[in-house]
Amino acid sequence: MSYPDGRLNLGTLKGVSSVVGPHGVGASPNDKKSKNKFIRGKKKSIFENYMSKEDVSEGLKRGTLIQGVLRINPKKFHEAFIPSPDGDRDIFIDGIVARNRALNGDLVVVKLLPEEQWKVIKPESSDKETEGAYESDLPEEICGSHLQQSLKGHKDSPDVIIEAQFDDSDSEDGRGNTQNVLVDDIKKLSVSVHEKDEETEAQRSYLACPVSYRKLEKRMLGHQVQKLRAPPWHRTQGLHQRGRCKDQQRQLAKSLGQAGEIEPETEGILTEYGVDFSDFSSEVLECLPQNLPWTIPPEEFSKRRDLRKDCVFTIDPSTARDLDDALSCKLLADGNTYEVGVHIADVSYFVPEGSELDQVAAQRATSVYLVQKVIPMLPRALCEELCSLNPMTDKLTFSVIWTLTSEGKILSEWFGRTIICSCTKLSYEHAQSMIESPTKTIPEQELPPISAEHTVEEVHQAVLNLHRIAKELRKQRFLDGALRLDQLKLAFTLDYETGLPQGCHIYEYRDSNKLVEEFMLLANMAVAHKIYRAYPERALLRRHPPPQTKMLNDLEEFCDQMGLSMDFTSSGALNKSITEIFGDDKYSLARKEVLTSMCSRPMQMALYFCSGMLQDQEQFRHYALNVPLYTHFTSPIRRFADVMVHRLLAATLGYRAVPDVEPSVLQKQADHCNDRRMAAKRVHELSTSLFFAILVKESGPLESEAMVMGVLNQAFDVLVLRYGVQKRIYCNALPLRSHHFRKVGKKPVLTLVWDPEDMEQEPVQQVITIFSLVEVVLRAEAAALKYSAILKRPGTEDLLGLQDKEECDCDHDHEQED
């Protein structure tokens, strides 16, 4: 937020008696009466206007502003945090007004108060495990699914993460060049609080330096169409079981319909996050080829390598229509090596630089995937016809082709523009059946049509060869220190006529997914090295910073308390710990899911960046993949960053002129891609949460086993194993006679005393500790598209024989891209 004279509203700070508001009105942050009077009298001035993109960019460049992902304390809604640039401390933002309409998970920028006003804030012990517990934006390379593929088939099996609490670990920290004067001051404070004194808990304290701003002006409540009668924070509080706007009709400049209906709710989500879902203008559509059906111009055949006779095919979700990658694999004459190709739709051919089409694609920056539909980055004629690698049709592609041994050793590689003709469109299920039946001839009627030039056996053998090589590549990646955090993800089946969810299941990530993922990763890494060698100052790359130090240290301490031997020294060490620490029985697998979710919390977001804007090449690294250089090349239909990389690669190969653009301009576009990518992820999560809430409302209540993730003094958090969602269960929502919180050593223990159903019976005690296995019921909340979790009354059954074990354990100390 900014004033006409350029001053910034510094909001409220704990311990400061008053702050100057937009009209010189002072109010104590703890003075409720003054606050209410201020709100009544200055209703339209509670929140200030957002800073312009130019001011934000300049502030980040100078280092006067810090960018980060906002985490709102789920227990104390007025408290919010972003990570400091050095990762050792959190920057504290006190109060809803100071947040200026920012929501949990939003990318915000903050300005620190003068150093003399800094304070060390000591969190309550019961908050330490849960503050920010639900925020993690796992990058695609670190998640347990190939999002590039699965999201395209969102109607079939959307690979999504339920609940905003999960996010997807692109918990991306802002620009790399902000760590200058601010980080020096932060380090000074870090040193001062690390001094040994009686308040050892100060080592986990937060910097009290508020003031948040949304970076993009289109992403706020009330900025464009959407106008809620209830204040924006009231709506957000619904995430924490604190009610909802009583007026169920959304108040909009144009009516979106009754709140609770899928499309009005979806449009509200899209509007809130500034997603452009309007039709493409006539000026944009005029940029497309007008004479359809379009055929490849004859001159292109002389400029490209002709691969139309090769056995090339796509592997995607069965309902995918925007097919932007294909694979090929043939055994070479020596009988020991293979020629493997990754063929990507040549989108840049159809998107002239500087055109109306180019500008709108750059502005949208990404396709946005909802449960029931996609908001495309490019017009559908491009996404689904001209660029999509549909079978038995000649298509323009950009290819990376390797000569590989069966062990995955690269002997040579080639980059270039090509023409392919895919012989078939395989689904993941088709490819999986081929992998699982290596010697069986699969009947043609069980497969999609295959062009006459190739046979079922030829395609089958190519899939088997790719699978064999992919297993070796994957094995080597993890030996080289890659990290994978496989989280539970939910997929929906929708009613064809009504669009309502009929059911859901945990998405299964199988060998066919892994096959495609390995070669996409390999292509992205190869292109990253190619463009960086050619243009070390202008390469568009993707980096993944290491985990936030403070949160990682807290997690390490927590694991020590729980008796879990975890190694957090590197991505590879962490991956090995998670892989080897538990067995394969049901209880161990559930504990692994909980621990994986906990390990995702400190992870930061992966970021696009221009190589010329970072001086330290060590900051180029991708933490999860544990590689020095990485980029995005394989999905240009849905990501504008990939289009930019295609253009750089084309210049590298002499297909076009050397890019005449300053690194700062490339960085600006990279920042915009980061912003839009985060918004798209949030929209995707909210869409998933919406559909799951509808499913609970229509089909519930739903019962499931759940595992306790965290214990507070009056509530506890659970991972609902059947659905992969996290929920908080409040003691005051249960028919309890009493409840008691205590620490056994450092382990939190919550004892519940249930009222007996029969007055002649004795009350039933239930002990809740981390890793307790419980049964929960998910139920819809009245007149709202929300759901809550309620603990089932314990019966005589002993869940997996583990309840007694948990009670015994109370006597001892113990416990993620792209």
Image: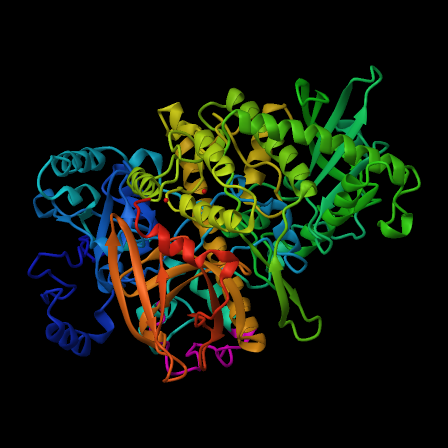
Q: Main secondary structure of the magenta part?
A: loop
| Residue 260 is inside the magenta segment | yes
Location of residue 94 (image quadrant): bottom left
Q: Note whether residue 811 is visible.
A: yes
Above/below status of 648 relative to 759: above
Q: Position of residue 250 (x, y in %)?
A: 43, 78
344 left or right of 209 in image: right
Q: How is the model colour-coded?
A: rainbow
Q: Nearer the viewer, residue 67 or 254?
A: 67
Q: Note whether residue 232 is visible.
A: no
Q: Position of residue 554 (x, y in %)?
A: 29, 42
Residue sitting at x 66%, y 19%:
410
589 left or right of 805 in image: right
Location of residue 262 (image quadrant): bottom right
717 left or right of 8 in image: right
Q: Nearer the viewer, residue 116 or 586?
A: 586
Instruction: Give the residues in magenta.
Output: 240-264
Above/below status of 757 relative to 727: below
Residue sitting at x 48%, y 70%:
777
Location of residue 337 (image quadrant): top right
Q: Nearer the viewer, residue 67 or 30?
A: 30
- How many numbered marks are there? 0
Q: Position of residue 42 (x, y in %)?
A: 18, 74
Q: Position of residue 435 (x, y in %)?
A: 77, 39
| Residue 357 is inside the magenta segment | no
- The quadrant in which the N terminus is found is bottom left
Residue sitting at x 49%, y 27%:
481
Above/below status of 453 relative to 740: above
Residue sitting at x 36%, y 53%:
808
